[in-house]
Amino acid sequence: MAGVQLQQLAYFVAVAEIRHFTQAAESLGIAQPSLSKQIRALEKELGAPLFSRARGNITLTPAGDVLLPLAKRILADVDTARLEVRELAGLVRGRVRLGATPSLCAGLLADALRRFHDAYPGIDLTVEEGGSRDLVRDLTRGSLDIALVILPLADDTPLVTTPILREHLVVAMPSDQRPRRSPMSVEDLHGRDLVMFRVGYDLRDSTIAACRQAGFEPRYAVEGGEMDAVLRFVEAGLGIAVVPSMVLAGRPGLRGVPLSPGEGGSPADRPGLERTIAIAHRKDVAPTHAARAFRETLEGYLTDAARDGSLPPGVRHLT
């Protein structure tokens, strides 16, 4: 791709996302013939058509499908490099694009972000909330600088991870309900109506894996929710859910019942009873100065919180 220009990649991404040449040109503030000319030049350089234009419908060819994630990552990396150089030159303070799971966003992350903002008020801070699988994908593609993800990751994931927290999972149920026993075992979920997270949440995967290892398929009352929706559905009495202990703080309508491995088991034998949170970045791109500053601030906050006992119940600092 030596002869490919960044401008051509930007034009290609715009057309690929909008699926209309004229509208893409308008969004970029250029004339449509100029856009088409640059796309043709890119196709000539790569030796393959990128778009199919049959009957006015713009779709990606197989070559376009391959190029799109690569082009997005290249443009994201260039943008990050530009900001990093400006930061070193003293023109701006930088930017941090942080990814975190909903349980962390609703829990201890807010106080860590406040400490970071107080220390670095000039740094632009963007938080992307999502399931761990989604965050790994976005981090790999270059749309995040750093992320808090759930371990383990796939062996071929191109990320550097450092474990920082371990948290217990609990069974959330309405506070006016009492469990048959406490702690509950995974087997106690058999036959119960579960409120289940959408695809992409590690909690969904770990809950299903724990149930299957215990010899049964979970039964869903409702599925497909984000964290806030799942907790609200449990409060309404639709079912119970396996959640991190930290998300129940400030929710008097819910109680959290500890989970035990069950008969003859240990936490290491059963997935889903606890999970490890790690801070991650790409292997092939060093974190920016601003991202490193956030990491140092977060680790300092966690150390202080562990020392003074202010970590949420069921959460342990690993450093």
Image (cartoon, helix red, strand yellow):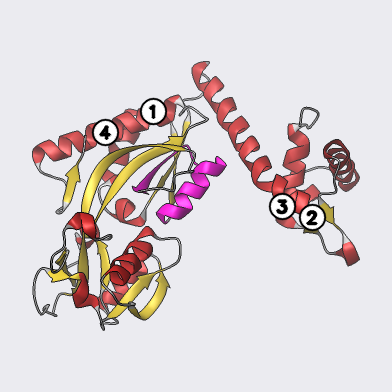
- Give the residues in magenta: 131-151
Q: How many other residues sit within 10 Å of disc 3, few (<14), some (14-19) or many (≥20)?
A: some
Task: For the residues labelled 1 and 3, say whether their Cβ atoms are less than 8 Å apart.
Answer: no
Q: Secondary structure at mark 2?
A: loop
Q: How many other residues sit within 10 Å of disc 2, few (<14), some (14-19) or many (≥20)?
A: some
Mark 2 is on which residue type?
Thr
Q: Would you place residue 248 above or below residue 72 in this image?
A: below
Where does label 4 land, which residue?
299
> Is residue 232 found left or right of 255 in the rendered image?
right
Mark 1 is on which residue type?
Arg
Q: Would you place residue 102 above or below residue 139 in this image?
A: below
CA separation, marks 3 and 2? 6 Å
Picture quadrant of residue 11 = top right
User: Which x, y percent locates residue 8?
Assistant: 78, 38
Magenta segment includes 315: no
Q: Quadrant of the C terminus?
A: top left
